[in-house]
Image (cartoon, rainbow, N blue to C red):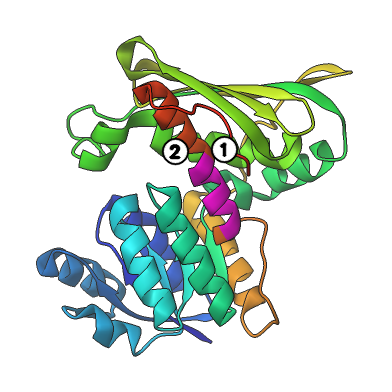
Amino acid sequence: MIRFGLLGTGHWAAETQGAALARHPGVEFVGVWGRSPAKATTVADRYGVRAHADLDTLLSQVDAVAIALPPDIQGDLALRAARAGRHLLLDKPVALTVEAADLLVAEVDARDLASVVFFTNRFHANVADFLAHAATRPWASARATLYASIFTPGGPYADSAWRREHGGLWDLGPHALSLILPVLGPVERVEALAGVGGISHVLLRHTGGATSTLSLSLDAPVAVNEVVYYGRDGAVPLVEGRPGSSVDAFGTAIDALIGQVGTASPRHACDVRFGRDVVAVLAAAQAAVDGVTPRSGAAT
C-alpha cells in the first residue's frame, strides 16, 4: 500500500483525483491539504480522510502526493514534496517556467523518486496503443485543433483565474503536445502567434524534420477536438472515443506511479522529464506570442 496525500480542493481534485485515490486498492488515502481549510475539510469529509492545515504534517505521513493546483503553485509544492522524499503524481503543466521544471527534474533525479504527470488521454488504453503503433511509422506532419468553452457561468472552471490568464496555450497545449511529441519526436524550433478570440496558433519543427501545428482556445463558441497525423497513408486521425472516465484514467496513472516505486532510476513516458519538455515548448511559444527573442531553440 502506498500512502497518498492530495494537494488541492477544486473540481478536478475532488471529482477525479480524490475519487480515484479513494477507490484504488493499492492506495491508503491519508489526507487532504488545500489553500482553503474549509474546502479541504469538505473534500476530506467526502472521502473519509483527514484535512490538514499544515502541509509539512501531511508530507510526514505519506509516501506520495497527488497535486491538483494551478501550475505556478504546483511547481513550488511539488518541489517541496520532492525535497521531503515524496513521489509525485502531478497535473499538467508541471510549472509555468522551464527553470521551475528543471529544478523539479533535478530533485526527482537526485532522490530517485517516482513521478507521473497526468496527461489524461495518455492513460486511456486505446490512445496509448494508438500512439505506440504510430511512433513506429513515418510521418510528415500533424495537426491538433483543441477548442473548448469553459468560461460559461456555472461551469466547473468558469472562475479559474490561471486559465483566464494563460489561456488555451498552457491548459490545452500540454494535451496536444502529449499526443504529438511521442509520435513526431522532440522539438527544435517553435513559432507562435495569438489569433482572435483568445486562440493561440503554434508551429513546431521536430528534430526529424516533421512539422506540426496547434490551434488552442478555452473560449471558443463551439468545442472542437481534433488530432490528425499526415504521412504516406494520408490523414490518420487519433483514435476516437475513450474507454472509461477521467477517474479510470487517473487510476491507471496511480498504477504507473506505484510501478516505479522501489525501482532503480524510476522512469515513465509521462514523468517529470517529459513534463519539463512540454513546458519548454510552451514557454518558447509564449515568448513568440509576446514578441520575445529568440523564438526558436526550445529543443526537447
Amino acid of disc 1: Ala
Q: Is residue 77 magenta?
A: no
Query: Residue 193: x and y, percent?
Result: 43, 17
Judging by the rendered image, the residue that carries numbered circle 1 is 298
Instruction: Name the residue located 28 percent from the left edge and 51 percent from the top edge.
Output: 11
Total marks placed: 2
How packed mark 1 is, by other alpha carbons closer than 10 Å (few <14, some 14-19, many 20 or more), is many
Does residue 240 lie above or below 42 as drawn? above
Residue 81 visible? The answer is yes
Q: Which mark is residue 243?
A: none
Amino acid of disc 2: Ala
Query: Residue 31: x and y, percent?
Result: 30, 79
Q: Nearer the viewer, residue 38 or 102?
A: 102
Query: Residue 209: x and y, percent?
Result: 77, 26
Question: In the image as oriented, which residue stretches furthest toward the left?
Answer: 38
* Image: magenta residue range: 273-280
Distance from Cα at disc 1 to Cα at disc 2: 8 Å
Which corner quadrant of the image does residue 168 belong to?
top left
Q: Verify CB contact (< 8 Å) between mark 1 and mark 2.
A: yes
How packed mark 2 is, by other alpha carbons closer than 10 Å (few <14, some 14-19, many 20 or more), is many
- Quadrant (top left/top right/bottom left/bottom right) for the C terminus: top right
Helix, strand or loop at label 1? It is loop
Query: Residue 214: x and y, percent?
Result: 54, 23
Judging by the rendered image, the residue that carries numbered circle 2 is 283
Nearer-N-terminus badge (1/2): 2
Instruction: Name the residue located 70 percent from the left edge and 32 percent from the top edge.
Output: 239
